[in-house]
């Protein structure tokens, strides 16, 4: 029998934002301004580091990249994060060296307990290992590790670990002949 959710009983029990409320508030106010196409990548990186992100050298963060909590983000050297990517990191996201996160990618560390009437959190970190490529509009869900040199194809939905060097492609739509 399906569980009836009672969202009024949600408490967020056990979730830790990782910083005091004033720091969270400052980030929430500043983050939308950093997404502007007029803000250079190197400035975005500098501000993210000031808020606690660990970011290596040679990182290119394009405009319109959304980052939920910078202090829960680690990016290695020589990585690219494409326009419109969303790093929804309620829990840590760790990205290795030489990783390409393409346009519109969603990395989502958050979820909820589907069988819990209070719909409490069910969050877990995401790890993207060195040399991986996550192509446009792919979605990586909580608790997943993308292995070294793996490729996640455009629009793929990834819910379990991807082995090093593997390729994950979205299912092909059936094409009808005229």
Image (spheres, rainbow, N blue to C red):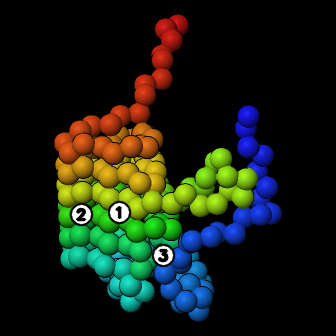
Q: Is residue 169 visible?
A: yes
Q: Position of residue 49 (x, y in %)?
A: 35, 84
Residue at point 20%, 51% (across, down):
148
Q: CA distance from mark 3 to mark 2?
A: 18 Å
Dot in front, 1 or 3: 3
Q: Position of residue 40 (x, y in %)?
A: 37, 78
Q: Secondary structure at mark 2?
A: loop
Q: CA distance from mark 2 to mark 1?
A: 12 Å
Q: Is residue 105 visible?
A: no
Horizontal arrangement in the rendering, residue 114 relative to residue 94 (left or right): right
Q: Which callout, 3 or 2, points at the residue further toward the start of the chain?
A: 3
Q: Which residue is mark 1?
A: 81
Q: Which residue is mark 2?
A: 96
Foreground pick, 54 / 78: 54
Q: Farthest residue in the top direction?
A: 178
Foreground pick, 85 / 156: 156
């Amino acid at each position: 029998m399906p569980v009836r959710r009672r969202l009024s009983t949600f408490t967020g029990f056990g979730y830790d934002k990782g910083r005091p409320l004033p720091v969270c508030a400052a980030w929430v106010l500043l983050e939308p301004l950093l997404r502007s196409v007029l803000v250079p990548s190197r400035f975005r990186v500098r501000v993210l580091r000031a808020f606690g992100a660990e970011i290596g050298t040679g990182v290119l963060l394009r405009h319109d990249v959304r980052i939920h909590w910078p202090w829960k983000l680690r990016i290695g050297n020589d990585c690219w994060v494409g326009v419109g990517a969303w790093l929804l990191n309620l829990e840590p996201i760790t990205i290795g060296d030489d990783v390409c996160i393409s346009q519109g990618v969603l990395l989502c560390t958050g979820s909820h307990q589907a069988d819990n009437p209070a719909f409490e959190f069910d969050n877990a970190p995401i790890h993207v290992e060195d040399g991986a490529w996550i192509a446009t509009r792919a979605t990586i869900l909580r608790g997943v590790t993308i292995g070294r040199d793996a490729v996640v194809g455009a629009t793929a939905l990834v819910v379990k670990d991807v082995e090093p060097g593997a390729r994950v492609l979205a299912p092909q739509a059936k094409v009808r002949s005229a």
